[in-house]
Amino acid sequence: MGMKRKDYEAALEPLTHELVSMARWAKCCGARIVILFEGRDTAGKGGAITAVRDRLNPRQCRTVALSKPSEDEQAQWYFQRYIAHLPTAGEIVLFDRSWYNRAGVEKVMGYASEDQVEAFLNAVPTFEKLLVDDGILLFKYWLGADQEEQEARLRERLEDPLKRWKLSPIDLAAREKYDEYTKAREAMLAATHTDHAPWTIVDFNDQRRGRLTLIRDLLERVPDTHEEPPAIDFPDLGHEPVRETYGVLKPIAGYPVD
């Protein structure tokens, strides 16, 4: 049985305060934080990202969800287009899928050759060590969901008009390649789970419980992030607040008001 919303929201509230403190700490000390969210289609990446960033300053915490590479990007070094989105001092960047596309969808769906995938897997540990050695705090999460749960979520997207946009032709094609994705994931984990950039696998069959688990793990692994908010002098106005007077909205030519 899935976690009830009221229980989830009660558990999330104190974690949200800790996330805000973490962001304040990152801003004060100039930390650069990168969090990768990977997993099968419908695993819950979007909801997890929303749970992390919901109360954070959008100027400080941003999400990167790149579409398929352009012709120019296909001619570049594979990692090049991701580097442009790495954080500067004080920033938190959440990757909704990342450079690991090459080891997952690109491999399984035939968008990358075996040689390209092998070269990628060989290069990733070195690439990520460069990031970590330069001071970036890198966290890699794989959100796990069983095929039965994936099927239920795909059907929900199919039947809900408000979620239909989430269902793409690639999702439907990938549905037939569950075993191939499993093999690709295992090869990816074996090649890229390193001491300097380890993977953390989180059970997302219950998405609410999974989000809480992920956030707790993140907060435990970031250095001591308690940072008191700065004191702000907020003197009394010294007079009654001004009340604005608004006229009746008049139509602009060509745009009548109902």
Image (spheres, rainbow, N blue to C red):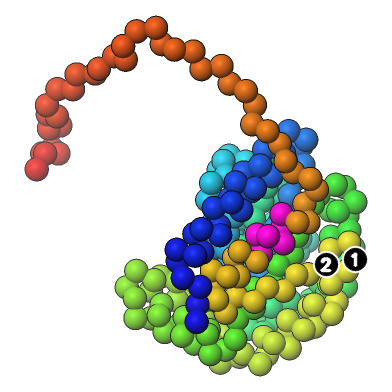
State the residue in front, 2 or 162.
Answer: 2
User: Picture coordinates of residue 211 (x, y %)?
Assistant: 59, 65
Say which residue appears at 53% left-offset and 90% top-offset. 148
Residue matched to label 2: 198
Say which residue appears at 65% left-offset and 48% top-offset. 18
State the residue in front, 55 or 233.
Answer: 233
Residue matched to label 1: 195
Residue 12 placement, left or right of 76: left
User: Picture coordinates of residue 218 (x, y %)?
Assistant: 71, 58
User: Picture coordinates of residue 223 (x, y %)?
Assistant: 80, 48
Say which residue appears at 90% left-offset and 66% top-offset. 195
Q: Are marks 2 and 1 in contact (CB under 8 Å)?
A: yes
Say which residue appears at 38% left-offset and 74% top-offset. 164
* CA distance separating discs 2 and 1: 6 Å
Give SS at disc 1. Answer: loop
Is 245 above or below relative to 29?
above
Q: Quadrant of residue 216?
A: bottom right
Question: Which range of residues does the magenta coloring cover?
Answer: 214-219
Whether residue 67 appears in this view of the structure is no
Q: Given the image, on which type of amino acid does mark 1 rest?
A: Asp
